[in-house]
């Protein structure tokens, strides 16, 4: 004979009952469930239905929450079951007070944390007379969670605590993410303008070359007409850069580069219309300087926002909240919403980790670049300067990480470390002497060593430049990706909570 279990609950807890408890007990073939909405007879007095259910069952499973304790009807069911010694309470939310009739039977335990429900439910099924094997089979065979289960899990106090922490931190971090969005939009505008600038430079070179060969006037006119068209495209791109700078207000006041770009664009237009090659050349140079310099400054803004992004503080509650959803499977009707949220959280997590790694690399590469810049003015830096630089280099090189970056940038970091090792070997007396060919006379070895040292430093300097440039490019992409990933987390979380 199956064990007959009457589920006593508050109707305010429907999501818990029909999303979690009833599906589990249904999966236990040796348990017969009695639930008011399914089994009470229409037309009978409610109290008689309740009394028949309590008296006709082997156990009354009282699902204890604050709503249960606040319900006179639920307490009446529990009191009758207690008097018949058939009450089995299970606490899902600790109420502000526990009725004495329930306290007498409250020896089974609590199921406050959904992460521990499997163990609690095993004990419940065992108490109902199921063997450990039957209990495990029931847990495995229970139907995928439905919409009510999802609703209950999202509304659970432990989950709501984490989501509340997420939204609170999100509000604090919002200005920093807006600055990242601004930098991304401005970076995109700069990149578009850089692409427009290249054909103008090429056309300028073509005109200067043609003028040097004294071609026919018609040929020169055709070149200037083409130059005018390219210049129009460049000026449109520069207008977009300036519009983005004003829209996002990355800095409080207009920067000098904004005036330089505007003035350079106006001068270029006038020079092309006047067909003045020298003025065209100088105005183009005036445009190119900030066009390639300022995106690097934007990266410093991104780096400066590291703490303001509060990535770790946003990630922690998300990870804890997703634990309540990842441990179960959901039916197709709701699985898509859950997967969308979990995927968005995973993307935010991975992108944030990548951005933090890139910021760390950027800082170390900036330090290396600053050190190398001291030697850049000399075509043949003295050995003592290279040796002095090397004393400040290894720690930064060691801390530059290659893992989790693009394949191209990982290769760049590996190359940087390899050139650093080569420079170290050239600096180390015992090793450097072995690198110089044996047929070099003894009196020429110092000069040969200095030449080798400079070559190795040149290779290292080039690797620093390439890696720094690659890191900055990837940093720009990662910052934009993080803003979009956080937006997807917010959108999917709202859908999940709706």
Image (spheres, rainbow, N blue to C red):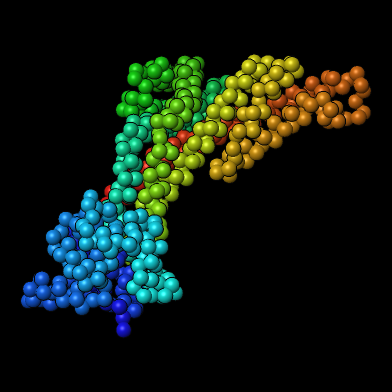
- Residue 240, image x and y in percent? 36, 29
> In front here: 138 or 45?
45
Q: Is residue 212 above or below residue 182?
A: above
- Residue 292, image x and y in percent? 49, 26
Q: Is residue 372 above or below residue 331?
A: above
Instruction: Report the residue at 70% width, 26% height from top.
Output: 458
Instruction: Report the residue at 64% width, 28% height from top.
Output: 395
Q: Taking 250 as reference, is 63 left or right? A: left
Asked if residue 342 shows in the view, the reply is: no
Q: Taking 368 as reference, is 329 left or right? A: left
Q: Taking 257 as reference, is 362 left or right? A: right
Asked if residue 318 shows in the view, the reply is: yes
Instruction: Locate residue 453: give its quadrant.
Output: top right
Direction bottom: furthest residue: 1
Instruction: Report the residue at 49% width, 36% height from top.
Output: 356
Instruction: Report the residue at 28% width, 64% height from top.
Output: 105
Instruction: Locate residue 324: give its quadrant.
Output: bottom left
Instruction: Locate residue 367: give its quadrant.
Output: top right
- For the image, the number of numbered tags is 0
- Residue 317, image x and y in percent? 38, 44
């Amino acid at each position: 004979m199956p064990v007959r279990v009457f589920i006593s609950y508050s109707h305010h807890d429907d999501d818990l009952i029909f999303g979690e408890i009833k599906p589990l007990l249904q999966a236990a073939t040796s348990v017969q469930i009695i639930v008011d909405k399914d089994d009470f007879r229409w037309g009978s007095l409610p109290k008689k239905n309740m009394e028949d259910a309590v008296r006709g069952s082997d156990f009354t499973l009282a699902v204890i929450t604050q709503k249960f304790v606040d319900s006179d009807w639920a307490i009446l069911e529990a009191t009758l079951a207690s008097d018949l010694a058939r009450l089995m309470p299970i606490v899902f939310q600790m109420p502000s007070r526990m009725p004495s009739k329930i306290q007498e039977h409250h020896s089974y335990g609590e199921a406050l944390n959904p992460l521990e429900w499997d163990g609690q439910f095993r004990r419940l099924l065992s108490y109902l007379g199921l063997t450990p094997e039957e209990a495990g089979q029931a847990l495995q065979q229970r139907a995928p969670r439905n919409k009510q289960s999802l609703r209950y899990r999202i509304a659970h106090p432990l989950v709501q605590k984490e989501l509340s922490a997420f939204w609170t931190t999100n509000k604090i971090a919002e200005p920093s993410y807006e600055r990242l969005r601004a930098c991304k939009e401005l970076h995109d505008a700069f990149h578009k303008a850089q692409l427009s600038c290249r054909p103008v430079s090429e056309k300028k070179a073509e005109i200067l070359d043609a003028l040097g060969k004294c071609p026919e006037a018609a040929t020169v006119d055709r070149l200037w007409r083409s130059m005018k068209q390219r210049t129009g495209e460049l000026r449109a791109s520069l207008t977009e850069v300036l519009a983005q700078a004003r829209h996002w207000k990355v800095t409080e006041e207009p920067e000098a580069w904004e005036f330089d770009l505007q003035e350079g664009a106006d001068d270029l237009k006038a020079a092309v219309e006047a067909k003045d090659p020298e003025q065209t050349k100088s105005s183009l140079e005036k445009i190119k300087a900030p066009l390639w310099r300022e995106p690097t400054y934007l990266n410093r803004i991104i780096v400066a926002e590291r703490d303001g992004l509060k990535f770790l503080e946003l990630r922690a509650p998300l990870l804890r909240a997703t634990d309540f959803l990842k441990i179960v499977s959901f039916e197709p009707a709701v699985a898509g919403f859950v997967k969308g949220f979990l995927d968005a959280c995973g993307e935010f997590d991975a992108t944030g980790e990548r951005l933090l790694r890139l910021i760390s690399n950027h800082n170390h590469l900036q330090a290396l670049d600053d050190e190398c810049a001291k030697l850049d003015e000399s075509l043949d830096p003295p050995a003592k300067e290279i040796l002095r630089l090397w004393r400040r280099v290894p720690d930064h090189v060691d801390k530059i990480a290659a893992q989790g970056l693009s394949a191209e940038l990982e290769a760049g970091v590996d190359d940087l470390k390899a050139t650093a090792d080569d420079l170290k070997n050239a600096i180390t007396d015992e090793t450097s002497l072995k690198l110089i060919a044996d047929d070099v006379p003894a009196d020429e070895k110092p000069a040969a060593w200095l030449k080798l040292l400079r070559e190795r430093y040149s290779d290292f300097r080039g690797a620093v430049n390439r890696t720094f440039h690659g890191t900055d490019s990837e940093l720009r992409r990662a910052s934009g990706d993080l803003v979009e990933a956080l937006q997807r987390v917010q959108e999917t979380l709202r859908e999940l909570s709706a």
